[in-house]
Amino acid sequence: MSDLTPPEAARLAARAGLPLADARTAGVAATANHIHSVVSALRDLDFGDTPPAAAYRALATRHADARKENPDGTR
């Protein structure tokens, strides 16, 4: 996929009904291109041995333990 250009960013914003000032189109396009590059890098990672998020169990923390003792938030 090629980079998003400022005119394309303006066109897509208008199509979505979002007001976008001409002065902001270059910044929006650059930000969208950066996000796309980060997401592309994440897609390239091999998560084959990684269990799904539903299998994750966080260890109890001091804050979680305090909430159990004082559910109303008092100390």
Image (cartoon, rainbow, N blue to C red):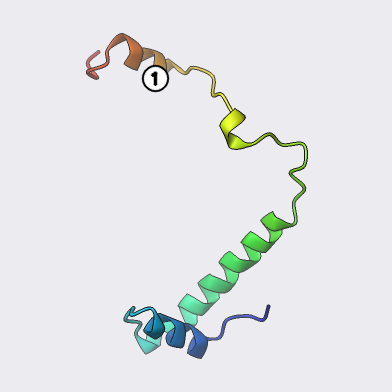
Task: Write the residue at 24% across / 19% down.
Answer: 73
Residue 7 drawn above or below residue 31: below
Q: Amino acid at mark 1?
A: His
Task: Write the residue at 47% across / 18% down.
Answer: 61
Does 51 sit left or right of 49 as displayed?
left
- Count of labels in the image: 1
In which quadrant of the rendered image does the N terminus lie?
A: bottom right
Residue at disc 1, secondary structure: helix
Corner quadrant of residue 3: bottom right
Task: Write the residue at 68% across / 34% down.
Answer: 51
Residue 35 in percent (x, y) is at 57, 65
Residue 37 drawn above or below residue 28: above
Q: Residues within 10 Å of mark 1 (few under 14, many from 20)?
A: few
Residue 48 in percent (x, y) is at 77, 42
Q: Nearer the viewer, residue 10 or 54?
A: 54
Task: Write the residue at 38% across / 78% down.
Answer: 16
Q: Residue furthest top?
A: 69
Residue 60 in percent (x, y) is at 49, 17
In which quadrant of the rendered image does the C terminus lie?
A: top left
Residue 52 drawn above or below residue 11: above
| Residue tagged 1 | 63
Does 71 sit left or right of 34 as displayed?
left
Q: Nearer the viewer, residue 11 or 35?
A: 11
Corner quadrant of residue 39: bottom right
Does 1 sit left or right of 25 as displayed?
right
Residue 59 in percent (x, y) is at 54, 19
